Amino acid sequence: MSRPPLLVKAAKEIWNCEWNILMNGLAPSDSKGNYKRPKNLQPEIKIPTKEDLEDRDMDQMPYLIVGQSCPWAHRVWIMHEIKGLKTTINLNIAQVNTSSGRWIFEPNLKGCKTLQELYKKCNVAKIKKATVPMLFDPGKKAKSQFRLINNESADLLEILNEWPVNTNNIDFNPKIHNKKIFNWQNLIQENINNGVYKCGFARNQESYEKASNNLFKKLDEIDQLIQNSGGPWIFGNKLTYADLYLFPTIIRWELIYSKLFKCTQKEISEYKNILKWRVNFYKLQGIPETCFEKQWLYEYYQGLFPLNPNQIVPLQQKLKDIINRNVE
């Protein structure tokens, strides 16, 4: 039985209105429909000294809060893993409650059931949305005031790179490439990390096409940069911030971004140098343990309701098979 045209039109208009309301909460945009990532807090950064850390029990050490699906938390998690910071920074994985859209702790962390509660315990009074990654200091005394060290992933990478106690002295910001690293990490952040979200969260065709064109233009540039550097990394034989910025987006590409976020202008298989680089990065010690394909699929496809209202999670190849595909 066919539906009356007026009914179909009304249903579309109602859905479009409700969709925009949902998107306003999920992904704010400018007046032209372009996605704009909200800014995080900017607390005064105070890093504990080496002497301070050596005088603490493990439970008194700072805590790094991450989430399995969050790409911004992922790059900080990778830094924590590669630098060998497990002895002086506790790692806690928050879980996503897809019904409420909030990060929760199972079991409770320091008496907190949710990340929102933990932010409040850190005396962060005004916060619209509790986000990961987050690094906080519980203090050495039982009744110490919790202190938020930082919750911006770019800042946290720098903090962890310079952390006073570590088991791996690798420097992700070597002076020989300092200016280039800064320029390229900003390019990757704005045009690729944020770029996939600008595609997925675009409110109209014009903003989507603008975001897609820019995203793939920058992927072209990155692919060429890796080829020119000789690899295996973006700047040749040294791992840098730029590699940490790029990996969480590229590792999620086929599972999430190409489908759910409509990043389809080119096949990722066309980027031979990026794919080889991805294989090399994934082989680094500890990196596979930071990748959770089942959790990514569940939290993206069922958590981002406006992008996938029927909540169906597509059947896909295993992550390891995807990584090794199309690589000579």
Image (tube, grey):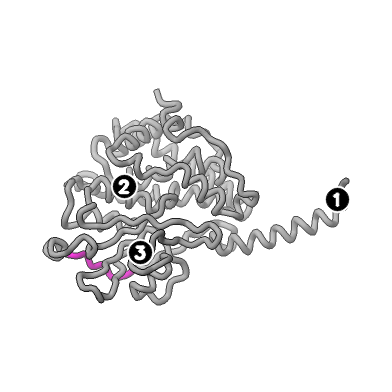
Q: Residue at x 31, y 62 (%)?
A: 135
- Please indicate whether residue 88 sits to the left or right of residue 119 in the image: left
Discs 2/3, front: 3
Residue 44 in the magenta stretch? The answer is yes
Task: Name the foreground residue: 113 vs 251.
Answer: 113
Q: Position of residue 62 (x, y in %)?
A: 25, 62
**Outermost left residue:** 51
Label located before the other in sequence (2 or 1):
1
Which of the 4 image quadrants contains residue 312?
A: top right
- Mark 3–mark 1 distance (CA, rounded to whole Å): 52 Å
Q: Position of residue 250 (x, y in %)?
A: 43, 41
Please determine whether, in this image, residue 247 is positioned above or below residue 299.
Answer: above
Q: Residue at x 35, y 73 (%)?
A: 121
Q: Position of residue 324 (x, y in %)?
A: 41, 28
Please determine whether, in this image, residue 314 is positioned above or below residue 104.
Answer: above
Type of the residue with mark 3: Leu
Q: Residues within 10 Å of mark 2 (few under 14, many from 20)?
A: many
Mark 2, residue position: 78
Which of the 4 image quadrants contains residue 120?
A: bottom left
Residue 96 in the magenta stretch? The answer is no
**Outermost front residue:** 107
How many marks are shown on the rendered structure?
A: 3
Q: Which mark is residue 109?
A: 3
Looking at the rendered structure, the secondary structure element under dot 3 is strand
- Mark 2–mark 1 distance (CA, rounded to whole Å): 53 Å
Looking at the rendered structure, the secondary structure element under dot 1 is loop
Q: Which mark is residue 3?
A: 1
